[in-house]
Amino acid sequence: MAHDVQVSVDPNAKLVIRNVGLMLSGRLEQPILDADTIVAVGGRIAAIGRRKDVDAEGATTIIDAKGSPLAPGLIDSHVHPVAGDWTPRQSQLNWIESTLHGGVTTMISAGEVHTPGRPKDVVGLKAMAIFAQRAFTAFRPGGMKIHAGAPVIEPDMQESDFKDLAEAGVRLLGEVGLGGVKDGPTARRMVGWARKYGIQSTIHTGGPSIPGSGLIDSAVVLEADTDVVGHINGGHTALPDREIRCICEGCGRGLEIVHNGNERAALYTLRVAREMDQLGRVILGTDGPAGSGVQPLGILRMIAMLSALGDLPAELAFCLGTGNTARMRDLDTGTIEIGKAADVVFLDRAQHSAGRDLLECVQLGDLPGIGMVVIDGLPRIGRSRNTPPADKVPEIVAA
């Protein structure tokens, strides 16, 4: 398996995945596909269907799923990277590569806020954002895709600063509220500037999480009108239910539920979104590394928790951590569709789970076992070192 950093993909490489037992699409409209074979060319999905109906000739790599289920690679909508695969928050190395063993193939930065001595002057924060964007575009531990370079806005910023950031390739804002901007009118003005130049925004929601942050309540969230309501279930302290409902009903933006938040508030948010028939707005993150640590299995744990305690069919729960996030974040991954990046995770019921198959295992609250992770059509890891062993595990039979 490849653990090196490889950004470029051979345009002639052809991957054939056959004998898939269950294929999860990542799309709420059709969460399960009637297919057992995927063909990827140049790192992108070229065909999906039954083996007899697709062109599997000339493969450079063949993976026999051996009946293992398959899902799109998971997406963590809320992480706080700093420098390479190290986090000073917990003084931990290789947390990103370890998260790959949790089935996550894409991460979205909500701000590199744990950087020691993080600059708060406009020149410094812009420089740091551009550096992070460049560094994490070039550095991919285990092949992980890391969308980083998310500046935390400060009161002295002007519209020209957002234009500069966008022209330099920055596409994200760090959590609004983690810097000096904590009021609705200022946040709304700057979020508007960011949106004008194609920069997506997220807001801190709930009580303070780190020194320098503060309470961001529903009134500020609604006035700021960011693209994503970051950790609506708190990071760590959640808003009262009435304010969570107020946010859900008062805007049409993404509702991000995180591992490092309040579990009861997470379930409440899920319930409100389903009542509104707006499950498509719900996305998942970990909000790590943080004071509570690093969560390599955080997205899997959220899927299992929301399915088991939120009475959400497991195939739909997987959509929250894949296709929903991809659509909200405008990513070319997260669903099993022709033209999308060939980022997939093979996973099955954990051995000795009370669940009879993958979906029942998750619905009962057990973590599934991961047998292999593929990014851009390249096998990256085999059996996960972090999950329980899976019943069925795929095998590379030709390469």
Image: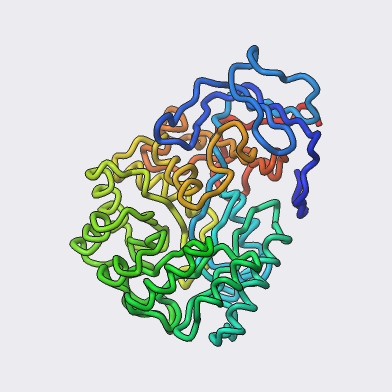
Q: Is residue 354 visible?
A: no
Q: Quadrant of the C terminus?
A: top right
| 156 shown above or below 262 | below
* Left or right, 327 with reference to 240: right
Please state which of residues 122 and 382 is positioned toward the viewer in this rendering.
122
Please state which of residues 219 and 86 is positioned toward the viewer in this rendering.
219
For residue 274, what is the image quadrant? Answer: top left
Residue 131 percent location from the top left of the image: 67, 72
Which residue is painted at 64% across and 25% down in the image?
47
Which residue is painted at 65% across and 68% down in the image?
168
Which residue is painted at 64% across and 33% down in the image?
45
Please state which of residues 190 and 247 is positioned toward the viewer in this rendering.
190
* Left or right, 222 with reference to 328: left
Please state which of residues 271 and 168 is positioned toward the viewer in this rendering.
168
| 39 shown above or below 280 | above
| 339 shown above or below 112 | above
Residue 20 percent location from the top left of the image: 59, 25
